Amino acid sequence: MNEKKETQAQEGNRNRARIFIVDDHPIVRDGLARLIGKKAKGDLMICGETDNAVDAIKTVAKIHPDLVMVDISLRGCDGIELTKSLRSQHNKLPILVLSMHDELLYAERALHAGANGYVMKNESSENLLQAIRKALAGGVYVSESVSSEILRRIKREGRDGVSSPAASLSNRELEVFSLLGRARTTRQIADELYLSIKTIETHLSRIKVKLGVETYNELIVRAALWVNSETA
């Protein structure tokens, strides 16, 4: 009976997304672990934690978590720099930045650094779990106020003559870009458009060049924001 329960527990853990926490406050790390353990409904689990960037980089490379939560204020290296380092080494790793700082000031910086979302520590547990799950699904999470501000900027730039993706991309590239902004993976885009993964990767490379985007994650952010601006 004990062996059966142990096997069931192992199977349950394998089905959970593994989250690694980087925060230099033990109380915060403990609180996040308790929150996720209590309210995640069996789909999320904590696989490790640390209080510094150096250990985070080493441990993430070793244990390969499904998502990393990074505090923006760390001793010796801030969360933005750590996010850049993690993104350079793990191109598709979902990263959420947590902060008590003004989100209108830091959220866009976090996204440009490679984060998949920016979450204020005073947000509700439901919003935090939503952010985690959205990032795991390939999406981008910011609060409604930040999203609205970025969308206003996009629309203002459009009125000021800055080219939108629709003006610079081919019809097929715009189709791929739009699906990427709807949190589709490369494989899902390929399946949906009846194309090979290699063809989609070629389209994505061309889109990055045309939009002046350096990383795949930044392209995801740009695509998600553009899709939101079109449906707002």
Image (cartoon, rainbow, N blue to C red):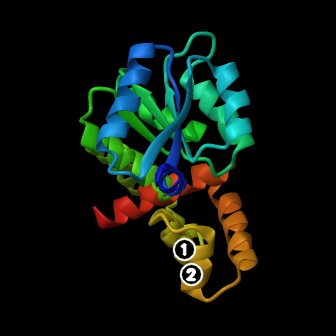
Residue at 62%, 70% (x, y): give it: 186
Q: Residue furthest bottom?
A: 194
Q: Above or below — where is 220 with respect to 128?
A: below
- Using the image as rendered, state which of residue 221 and residue 154 is in the foreground: 221
Q: Quadrant of the C terminus?
A: bottom left
Badge 2 marks a residue whose secondary structure is helix
Q: Above or below — where is 63 with respect to 161?
A: above
Q: Above or below — where is 56 with respect to 183?
A: above
Q: Residue furthest top?
A: 75
- Percent position (x, y) of residue 231? 31, 66
For the question of whether residue 1 can be seen, the reply is: yes
Answer left or right for 108 relative to 174: left
Residue at 59%, 55% (x, y): give it: 219
Rounded to the nearest angstrom, the CA distance separating label 2 from label 1 is 5 Å
Badge 1 marks a residue whose secondary structure is helix
- Percent position (x, y) of residue 79? 55, 24
Alpha-carbon neighbours of circle 2 within 10 Å: few (<14), some, or many (≥20)? few
Type of amino acid under label 1: Leu
Residue at 66%, 86% (x, y): give it: 195
- Percent position (x, y) of residue 121? 33, 27
**Tag 2–tag 1 contact (CB < 8 Å):** yes
Which disc is residue 89 wearing? none
Quadrant of res 98: top left
Residue at 35%, 21% (x, y): give it: 100
Type of amino acid under label 2: Asn
Residue of label 2:
171
Q: How many marks?
A: 2
For the question of whether residue 146 can be seen, the reply is: no
Q: Residue furthest front?
A: 1
Residue of label 1:
174
